[in-house]
Image: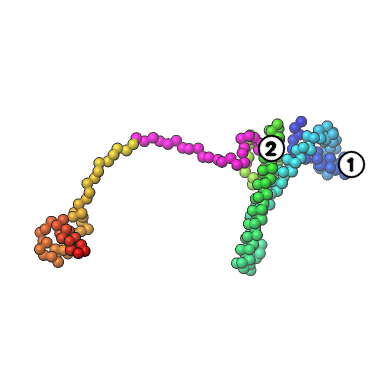
Amino acid sequence: MHIPPKRRRRCLKVHHLSMAGVAQRKIAKQLGVSHATVRSDLRLIEAHWSDIATPAADDLLLEQLQLLREQTARIARTDLMEAFGSHITVAEYIKACDARDAKVLAFIRETRRTIDAVHRRAAEREAQPDLYQGDVESLQETDETAPKLDKTVHPNSASLQPEQEIVAPESPREKFPPKAAQPAQPAPDPSTDPLLDPILEEAVTLFPHLKGQPPDQILTFLDQLTEPT
């Protein structure tokens, strides 16, 4: 028999108070329910105790996971300057940052261990695919900042793998025809470079016999002068 998580928790509280000797009417008043609801929960406990007690460990893990998330977020948002005042030194600030980061990392490690435990429990209870459905809803109700979960996929579904790598789909590649080979361009004639005009003019000024000679011959003459002997 599958019992909703909220009623499971209430039955455990009713059982605990009843074993402590609290009267049924006082239990109903303390829990904010009717006397008939308490009697119904006690009858359910007697008939289906194993269905209530067995998932209790799952409930505890989920509550612990939610608590770790809240504690990690609270520590990460700590404003050290506001906490220590404006008279904190640089060394004290660095030390406080290191201490805060160490706490955050410790909570993250504990959160990972708890998540692994949740997945192990889910793998052991594949016969109840909706076991955690109510728990996921209750977690979202208590944490408004939690991301919206897909209600159609359960944490113990075989499609959820904690270490599965998410690969983005490849975009279709457009096929283009190969580019035609371009004909080789002839090498530019260095003698026609306009940047060489000042050099040619200076060469003619220094060596008047070069006047009227083509630029390539003037450049050859200058190369011969600059070649090491």
Residue at horizontal 62 percent and vertical 37 percent from the top: 160
Residue at horizontal 65 percent and vertical 65 percent from the top: 85
Question: Compared to 180, does 76 lie above or below?
Answer: below
The percent coordinates of residue 124 (x first, y second) are 70, 36
The percent coordinates of residue 147 (x first, y second) are 62, 43
Q: Is residue 171 magenta?
A: yes
The secondary structure making up most of the magenta span is: loop
Task: Indicate left or right for 223 with 56 as reference.
Answer: left
Residue at horizontal 61 percent and vertical 67 percent from the top: 91
**Label at residue 122:** 2
Amino acid of disc 2: Ala
Q: Provide the secondary structure element on which disc 1 rests.
A: loop
Extreme residue in the front direction: 229
Q: Is residue 69 visible?
A: no
Check the picture and name the quadrant holding the N terminus: top right
Check the picture and name the quadrant holding the C terminus: bottom left
Look at mark 1 in the image and give the residue it sits on.
Answer: 23
Highlighted range, magenta: 154-177
Indicate which label's residue lies in the foreground, 2 or 1: 2
Q: Is residue 212 visible?
A: yes
Sequence-first disc among 2 and 1: 1
Give the total number of marks visible in the rendering: 2
Q: What crowding class fits label 1: few (fewer than 14 Cα within 10 Å), some (14-19), or many (20 or more)?
A: few
Q: How far apart in space, not on screen, are marks 2 and 1 (Cα)?
A: 37 Å
Amino acid of disc 1: Ala
The percent coordinates of residue 28 (x first, y second) are 84, 41
Q: Is residue 142 magenta?
A: no
Q: Provide the secondary structure element on which disc 2 rests.
A: helix
